[in-house]
Amino acid sequence: MSGTERPGLGGRHALVTGGARGLGASITRRLAAAGASVTVADVRRDKAEKLCAALTEEGHDAGFAELDVRDAGAAAELFRELDERARPVDVLVNNAAVDVSKPIEHLTAEEVTRVISTNLLGPVYLCLESYRRMIARGHGHIVNILSTASNRTWTEAGPYAAGKSGLRAFTHTLFKEAQRDCPGIGVTGIIAGGMETPFVLERFPDADTSKLQSPDIVADTVLYALSVPVGSVVPELVVVPRSEPSWP
């Protein structure tokens, strides 16, 4: 899909977690450019508000909601607020994620809890809130950002791989239930390989960026999943750099 051949998302409202920077910001920009109104849900208020201000200046509809996805109560409250403002979520993109790159013998219980809660429980909480509402309305699309770690892991990635593997399994289950429950609901897992984003470069500052892909490529993949006609659905997509070492 080229940068100009984007599906129309006019009249649809998208919620993007971790949307303030990196892949999340790329997805937010792509969705806004395709005509969607976008809520950026993040813990990084400054970055999120700057992104929303820039999009608003360009003529897009973008707003910020402070959210720690680990807080199930806060997620439920956000959905209630959006409903009250007549901005129900038509597209949910679960993108927020963290990692702690340490050998298992040096991990603390707090670090493991933070990674698993953010990468697995958080997306599940948001799926619970959005899916039941989509069932009631008869339409919607959930996109869960996965990782090559959901298929094949490596050292110093135990909690991250466990969280992403669990989210992949949950996504597959949700896809099957949507097939049964409502043909108007799409569920897609996107397995993304290494990207040139802060998520990678802050942990691995010496990474060879020539072997990483642009987050815009993955964002375009999200748009592709959303562009498929109602009679079809894309349950899973894999997009990796040609030199990706962890696939297959």
Image: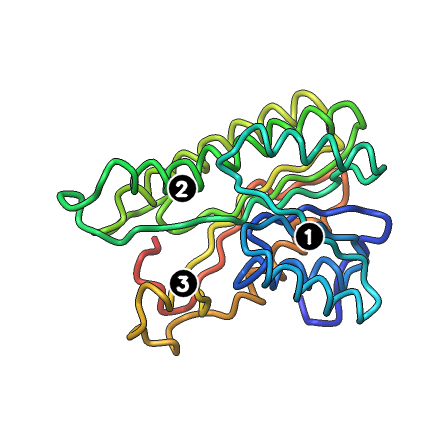
Q: Amino acid at mark 1?
A: Phe
Direction bottom: furthest residue:
210
Image height check: is 183 above or below 97? Answer: above
> From mark 2 to mark 3, how far is it between C-alphas?
14 Å
Residue 189: image location, x then y, percent:
53, 43
Q: Which residue does the image show at 74% across and 39% down from the upper left?
A: 89
Q: Which residue does the image show at 37% across and 37% down from the upper left?
A: 116
Q: Which residue does the image show at 61% across and 47% down from the upper left?
A: 66
Q: Amino acid at mark 2?
A: Lys
- The tag earlier along the polypeptide, 2 or 1, is 1
Residue 58: image location, x then y, percent:
80, 71
Q: Which residue is mark 2?
A: 164
Q: Which residue is mark 3?
A: 194
Q: Which mark is residue 52?
A: none
> From mark 2 to mark 1, how far is it between C-alphas?
26 Å
Q: Are marks 1 and 3 in contact (CB under 8 Å)?
A: no
Q: How is the image coloured?
A: rainbow
Closer-to-camera residue (25/174): 25
> From mark 1 to mark 3, how far is it between C-alphas?
27 Å
